[in-house]
Image (spheres, coloured by chain):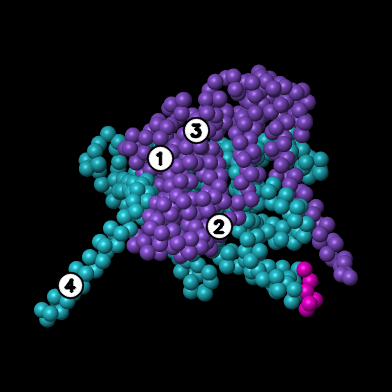
Chain colours: A purple, B cyan
């Protein structure tokens, strides 16, 4: 029989308590936002909403989806995420396959050219000029075109494809298969787990980005994205958090408070809408995460 | 003599013939990869051309060749400008804080997770801890601002309940707290995600080592110190080199979104400086110089760290 050591019991208890605290600290801010998003706007200002709404309402969500602007931004976000995801997954897989062919003469050169971009950037201003010169300012393509293969994803997929038995590819080649055929018929079907992983990375990245909207598309409202709308809303109200005079005025329920009502609850609702797609798809894809996520593999 | 020359000539010819023969036989691979190489050169490498602006006094109305060349004047301006030096200080400070806190918390959490024997509990904690990684900085900074708010922000509420503070603190309006707020925000978002790679390294440790230590009567703490931590050392070294190569990338979104006029002396980083001077004020040359400085320093640090790791016989990146 195994002896149960006192030290182990103490350690395990502390460890479990620590993990539970971690879970609370991670989930509470979000749970609180959900509660506020379902609470009546004016009432939220009184504070004291923690995990459950006090005066339940759908109004904040109605405002988002009926308002037009925000719903449109939501659609733009969906479009850019889906298009980026499809293009990236397909192109990354194709390029990664060529970089696993040992006989390929440009293999090293292309790999290095991509890996270098992980550490090296020309900078914001030169990029801005490039986008401008290509005529991509205020153009939907700027969301999709500049990033169709990311170096990190490329390395992850390449590492995974390398684990596919060479014999499978050799056998197909002996039967007269071309590289196209091998890629479509052998590599693509066998790489599903890793492609699911990078599909998640790309879609989440596209869904979450706002800086490209801010920098390249801010003068065309119909190209605005959900995150950018959220960002604009945040900057109008966050001042209450650091301006003592404003904060006092809000607390006193003055005129400023009335203007603040909508933004606080609306922001909570948009935050929920912006986070929900991620929270929904993530459990399905998370079992693939660890696949190929080994930085050591960045090395040749 | 003539024979030798003929030989080399022949050799070059044969070599080039073999090369072109390979190109033809590998045309499909080339077709499947060159479009992306061209794309990469356009979007990642061609903007380097824009660095020339850093040596000019660029005016948008003139053509490239009509621009006035000013040598290193922009860089001189940067290094004598109090504003830029402050921005540089902020960038390095926040980068160091994020890096240190990031490594300590991720390794600690990974070790603790690794000690959990109940698979279901471990899996659930992991799943929840990864979640913030996938939320945007806009959402995360919004949540942080809510938590730090004086209007029932949970941080103030808890601290007041614990009687650690008398009245709510306007956390985001105090410059001296800003770097640490950024540090903790970064940890909140990324700590779970950063454990993945350490946990993968720990899973690769030979269980026989633990069994042998058990037989020798090692305590749990001794096993962590002598088996688990050495087992993740090479992973840690690779990540450290990468982090050093990112010293001047202290993050941009966090500071931009949480920063405000009250803490501007503490919150602005090089990227915000570039954005302000370049896009908002239109001083493209100065902004390009700042961005170029950042890129060059980062890549130099990366190679230096990599070289040092090589000299010390440690795991290295390139």
Q: Residue at x 33, y 37 (%)?
A: A134
Q: In the displayed structure, would residue B154 be above or below residue A41? A: below
Q: Real-space Cα distance between discs 4 and 2?
A: 46 Å
**Secondary element at image label 2:** loop
Is residue A90 visible in the rendered image? The answer is: yes
Q: Which mark is residue A79?
A: 3
Query: Does the residue at mark 1 contact the one at mark 4 (Cβ under 8 Å)?
Result: no
Q: Please determine if labels 3 and 1 lie on a single subunit.
A: yes
Give the secondary structure at mark 4: helix
Residue A145, labelled with which disc? 1
- In the image, A259: left or right of A53? left
Residue assigned mark 4: B10
Measured in 3D between alpha carbons, the distance from the residue under mark 3 to the one under mark 2, in whole angstroms, is 28 Å
Camera-side residue: B181 or B120?
Answer: B120
Query: Which span of residues is magenta-colored?
Result: B214-220
In this rendering, which labeled residue sits more in front, label 1 or label 2?
2
Are dots 1 and 2 on a single chain? Answer: yes
Q: Position of residue A129 (x, y in %)?
A: 35, 40
Question: Residues at badges 3 and 4 in contact (C-beta under 8 Å)?
Answer: no
Q: Which of the two discs, 3 and 2, labels the residue nearer the N terminus?
A: 3
Quadrant location of the C terminus of chain B in the rendered image: bottom left
Structural crowding at the residue carrying mark 2, measured as other residues with C-alpha within 10 Å and reported as few (<14), some (14–19) or many (≥20)? many
Give the CA distance from mark 1 to mark 2: 26 Å
Give percent across and percent down for residue A243: 62, 32
| Disc 2 target residue | A292
């Amino acid at each position: 029989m195994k002896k149960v050591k006192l030290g182990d019991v103490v350690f395990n208890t502390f460890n479990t308590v620590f993990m539970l605290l971690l879970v609370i600290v991670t989930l509470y801010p979000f749970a609180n936002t959900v509660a506020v998003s379902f609470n009546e706007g004016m009432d939220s200002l009184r504070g004291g909403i923690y995990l459950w709404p006090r005066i339940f309402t759908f109004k904040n969500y109605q405002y988002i989806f009926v308002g037009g602007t925000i719903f449109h931004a939501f659609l733009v976000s969906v479009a850019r995420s889906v298009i980026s995801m499809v293009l990236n997954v397909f192109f990354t897989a194709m390029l990664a396959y060529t970089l696993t062919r040992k006989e390929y003469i440009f293999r090293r050169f292309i790999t290095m050219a991509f890996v270098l971009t992980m550490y090296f950037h020309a900078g914001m201003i030169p990029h801005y000029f490039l986008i401008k010169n290509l005529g991509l300012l205020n153009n939907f393509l700027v969301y999709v075109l500049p990033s169709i293969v990311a170096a990190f994803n490329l390395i992850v997929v390449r590492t995974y494809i390398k684990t596919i038995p060479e014999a499978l590819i050799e056998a197909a080649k002996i039967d007269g298969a071309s590289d196209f055929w091998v890629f479509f018929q052998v590599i693509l079907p066998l790489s599903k787990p890793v492609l699911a992983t990078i599909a998640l990375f790309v879609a989440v990245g596209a869904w979450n980005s706002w800086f490209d909207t801010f920098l390249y598309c801010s003068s065309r409202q119909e190209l605005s994205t959900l995150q950018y709308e959220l960002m604009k809303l945040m900057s109008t109200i966050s001042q209450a958090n650091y301006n003592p005079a404003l904060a006092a005025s809000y607390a006193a329920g003055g005129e400023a408070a009335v203007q603040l009502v909508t933004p606080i609850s609306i922001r909570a609702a948009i935050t929920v809408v912006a986070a929900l797609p991620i929270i929904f798809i993530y459990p399905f894809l998370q079992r693939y995460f660890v696949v190929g996520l080994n930085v050591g593999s960045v090395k040749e | 003599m003539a024979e030798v020359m003929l030989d080399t000539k022949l050799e070059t010819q044969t070599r080039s013939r073999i090369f072109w023969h390979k190109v033809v036989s590998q045309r499909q691979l080339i077709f499947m990869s060159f479009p992306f190489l061209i794309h990469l050169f356009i979007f990642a490498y061609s903007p380097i051309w824009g660095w020339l602006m850093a040596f000019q006094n660029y005016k948008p109305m003139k053509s490239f060749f009509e621009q006035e060349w000013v040598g290193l004047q922009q860089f001189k301006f940067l290094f004598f400008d109090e504003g830029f030096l402050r921005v540089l200080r902020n960038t390095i400070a926040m980068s160091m804080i994020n890096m240190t806190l990031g490594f300590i918390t991720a390794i600690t959490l990974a070790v603790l997770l690794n000690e959990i024997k109940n698979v279901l509990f471990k899996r659930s904690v992991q799943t929840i801890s990864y979640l913030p990684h996938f939320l945007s900085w806009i959402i995360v900074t919004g949540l942080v601002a809510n938590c730090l708010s004086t209007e029932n922000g949970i941080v103030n509420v808890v601290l007041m309940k614990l009687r650690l503070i008398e009245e709510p603190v306007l956390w985001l309006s105090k410059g001296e707290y800003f770097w640490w707020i950024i540090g903790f925000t970064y940890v909140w978002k990324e700590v779970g995600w950063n454990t993945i790679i350490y946990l993968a390294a720990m899973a690769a440790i030979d269980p026989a080592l633990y069994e042998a230590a058990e037989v020798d009567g090692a305590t749990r703490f001794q096993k962590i110190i002598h088996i688990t931590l050495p087992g993740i050392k090479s992973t840690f070294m690779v990540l450290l080199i990468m982090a050093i190569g990112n010293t001047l990338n202290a993050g941009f979104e966090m500071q931009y979104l949480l920063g405000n006029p009250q803490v501007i002396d503490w919150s602005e980083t090089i990227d915000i400086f570039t954005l302000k001077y370049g896009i908002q004020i239109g001083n493209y040359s100065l902004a390009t110089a700042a961005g170029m400085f950042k890129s060059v320093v980062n890549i130099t640090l990366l190679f230096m760290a990599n070289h040092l790791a090589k000299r010390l016989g440690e795991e290295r990146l390139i």
